[in-house]
Amino acid sequence: MPKKKLDELSSLEKTNLLKLLKKRNAKHNYVARETIPCTERTEHIPLSYAQQRLWFLAQSEKIGTAYHIQRAFRLRGQLDLNAFRCALDSIVKRHESLRTTFKIDGKEATQKIAPAENAHFYLTEDMVKNTEELEQLLYEEAKRAFDLEQGPLIRGLLIKEDENIHVFLIVMHHIVSDGWSMAIFIRELNNLYASYANGKENCLEPIKIQYADYAVWQRKWIAGKRLDQQAKYWQKELSSAPTFISLPTDYLRPAKKNYTGSVVEFSLSEKLSRDLKKLSTQHDTT
């Protein structure tokens, strides 16, 4: 049977579709999507729960660079440095989270958003003569600590290898960004650079909702009865959970956590990938 668009369905088909969706929502206890409103920028902007966890870890443990997000790109061809800087500045002005720092207000940490007109991307430049120098510079910049209170919490390093080859390193703290957002950053950088390099204006539509709006909405949404229900559920589920999970590993658990990790690459067959996606769909999981 050929697929139909929504406006091509008959009244009976639309009615049956609505019944099916209501039945599915009731079965899985889905919550209707709410609209996140814009909020006034006051002196007291709360952290989202994700930001609060990261801020707490930064205060309570020596986590070092465990929550740094970094990525390096090799840029080939003639670089219009002025257009490149303008594009980076525009992204910081566009996204409040990239010009946000965190301070203690009373007993709680709050977000402090710098005005857009005074904001710019913190970019340093350098030159190298060989691969060893390049790798050392990238390593040092990626490991350099952030100050959550003073900022900036995003920075870049532009390294010139020769006239037509540059390496651009972006480093962000996870409290203001994540891996998924890195793709957005790069896409916007490409679009803005192309516009500025060709003498055009900012080509991106303004953002209607900022992360601070989400943080305020989230705090209000997860409150009162809903918060009590969530807390009681997890307290019950985790009441008998062990302090440590004894997983089989090659080495004993270190006496002191050092956050030193590595990467193990592997691939899944096409059939196994399809089967896993099918299994996820059946159980409504990612």
Image: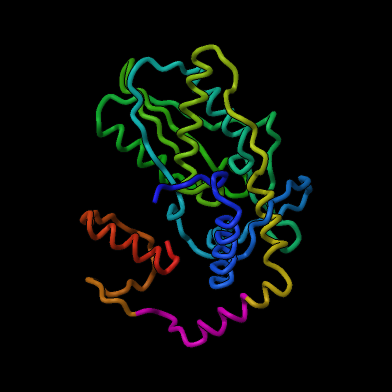
Q: Is residue 202 left or right of residue 254?
A: right
Magenta segment: does it hold 241? yes
Task: Name the one closer to the observer, 237 or 49.
Answer: 237
Q: Is residue 162 left or right of residue 55?
A: left
Residue drawn at x 65%, y 44% as measured from the top left: 210
Magenta segment: does it hold 175? no
Splitting the image into 4 quarters, where does residue 133 fall?
A: top left
Check the image and report above or below for 257 versus 135: below
Residue range corresponding to the magenta coloring: 230-245
Residue drawn at x 38%, y 63% as measured from the top left: 258
Q: Name the colour scheme.
A: rainbow
Q: Position of residue 264 (x, y in %)?
A: 25, 56
Check the image and report above or below for 31 versus 216: below
Q: Position of residue 204 (x, y in %)?
A: 58, 28
Q: Is residue 100 left or right of residue 137?
A: right
Q: Quadrant of the C terminus?
A: bottom left
